[in-house]
Amino acid sequence: FHRGNFQDLAKREITVAERQKIGRFFYRFRNGESGADVYDRVSSFMDSLFREMDGNLMPNSNILIVSHGLFMRLFLMRFYRWSVEKFHTLENFNNCGYCILERDDQDGSFILKTELKIFPERKRTAMKDLKEKFSEQSFNEEIITTSYTRDTKNDEKKND
């Protein structure tokens, strides 16, 4: 009976260290997917969604997408064309978390209305340190929320 990748603490530390070295976006868990794999599925989903939107099959409709946190973060990454580096700064959504994108009626763009949790700077720095000893506590810290950021229509317009 297999209870997941983190049942054996020795293997878990190795897995966590490998994930830190490779990065959360590119690391593929045993018997699972990497963020990059899910990103590809997000892209296919978005292509289908945009075809339906462009074909006026859903004019002025609200759309509800129900998914897990990784898919939600990768959806936003793909939609707003965020970099892998920016993805790595984002914490996962809480259980039953939600994200709202609101259409701007004037230009048709979508504004991110939900405040996203980001890792604190000290945690982002520690994640880059490959010599760090990964303990049970350091792995659990990965899900602790501390600060928030808010994006507007997209990163490019923000930098203008």
Image (spheres, rainbow, N blue to C red):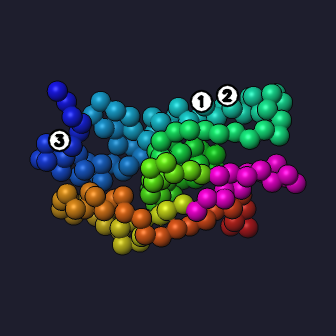
Kind of residue sitting beneath label 2 = Ser
How far apart are the two marked residues, 2 and 1, measured between alpha carbons? Answer: 6 Å
Classify 10 Å Cα crowding around label 3: few (below 14), some (14-19), many (20 and above): few
Nearer to the camera, 118 or 24: 118
Q: In this picture, is 54 found above or below 9?
A: above
Instruction: Of the two numbered discs 3 and 1 on the same chain, state the one appearing first in sequence.
Output: 3
> In the visual, does 81 lie left or right of 22?
right
Classify 10 Å Cα crowding around label 2: few (below 14), some (14-19), many (20 and above): few
The question of residue 107 being in magenta is answered with: yes
> In the visual, does 51 lie left or right of 132?
right
Coordinates of residue 18 in the picture (x, y in percent): 25, 48
Q: Label 1, on which residue?
A: 44
Q: Residue furthest right?
A: 106
Q: Label 2, on which residue?
A: 48
Please tell me which residue is depicted at 85% across the width and 52% down the height of the picture.
Answer: 105
Nearer to the camera, 56 or 77: 56
Quarter of the image with the C terminus in it: bottom right
Q: Residue furthest front?
A: 96
Q: Label 3, on which residue?
A: 7
The question of residue 85 being in magenta is answered with: no
Q: Which residues are magenta?
A: 100-115
How far apart are the two marked residues, 3 and 1, measured between alpha carbons? Answer: 33 Å
Residue 138 visible in image? yes
The picture quadrant where one finds residue 46 is top right
Label 1 SS? helix
Please tell me which residue is depicted at 79% across the width and 32% down the height of the picture.
Answer: 58
